[in-house]
Amino acid sequence: MDSEPEMDSKGLCLVLTEPGPKMSEEEYHDWYDNEHVPNRLSIPTFFNAARYKASDLKTPRWLTLYDLSEPAVADGPEYQDVHANGSDRDKLMLSKIQYLTRRAYSFIPESSKIHPDVPKTAFPGKFCLVVSMQTTPEGEDEFNRWYGEEHIPMLSKVPGWLRSRRYKLFSVKERGQLVNGEECKPLQYLAIHDFSQDGYMETSEFKAATSTTWRAEIVKSIVDRELRLFELYNFKE
């Protein structure tokens, strides 16, 4: 495993938001970029924040990923202090936001992989594939073995691939709701794949990685799945 801080971190905080009609996009980004994220990055165990915009026309449209020292700090005492001592504006915006889900995850290093020949400045990748899955209890071990032994090694051959990180759900907090019956389920396993270029899903290498005999067997034990596509909006450390 490479020694980059984001790969060494043992936790992840994933936040999906949909601003909604009570705030403008400009107001949302000004608050999020200039107050909300900097306050959280004042916590030493929050290493960085990568913000993304959905490129798949689905909601929630906005994703933030915080690399953490461990999953428990996502809702630990230092975070609680920052949250409780937020400005009046911060509290107002959080009350106005249409939907927010905040999930902490534990890192699974044994089935994560980083490109060995790219500099730290290549991360996070410009394009991000986020895959959530829920397996049956009896299929869980084989699912994890497939992901680590076949799936990620094959994805690493896709042009523009930079890294694949896997996580297991630790905790969830949610407020508000999406419209038109849309759902945003916190599933058991999360995989985040970074790419330097778009169009990766149309490559022969990606199609090969998602059409093996072993994968066809694994699919039988997957009870729920969500796939999201995002493009990098900004990155702060």
Image: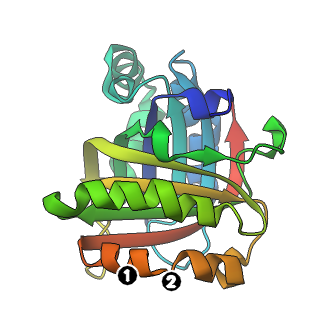
Whether residue 203 is situated above or below residue 77 in the rendered picture: below
* Residue 235, horizontal then vertical, whole percent: 70, 42
Q: Quadrant of residue 209?
A: bottom right
Please state, as top left, top right, bottom left or bottom right, where the N terminus lies in the image.
top right
Quadrant in the rendering for residue 11: top left
Crowd class of label 2 (few under 14; some 14 to 19; many from 20; radius 10 Å): few
- CA gap between label 2 and label 1 equals 7 Å
Q: Estimate the x, y position of residue 62 in percent, counting from the top left.
A: 53, 59
Residue drawn at (64%, 35%) of the image? 34
- Nearer the observer, 197 or 116: 116
Q: Is residue 181 left or right of 19 when viewed as pictured? A: left
Contact between marks 2 and 1 (CB within 8 A): the answer is yes
Q: In this picture, is 67 found above or below 138? A: above
> In the image, what residue type sits under mark 2?
Ser
Q: Which residue is mark 1?
A: 216
- Asked whether the viewer can see residue 85, the reply is yes
Q: Which residue is mark 2?
A: 211
Q: Considering the numbered disc 1 on the image, is that residue within a helix, a strand or a loop?
A: helix
Name the kind of residue labelled 1 in the image.
Answer: Ala
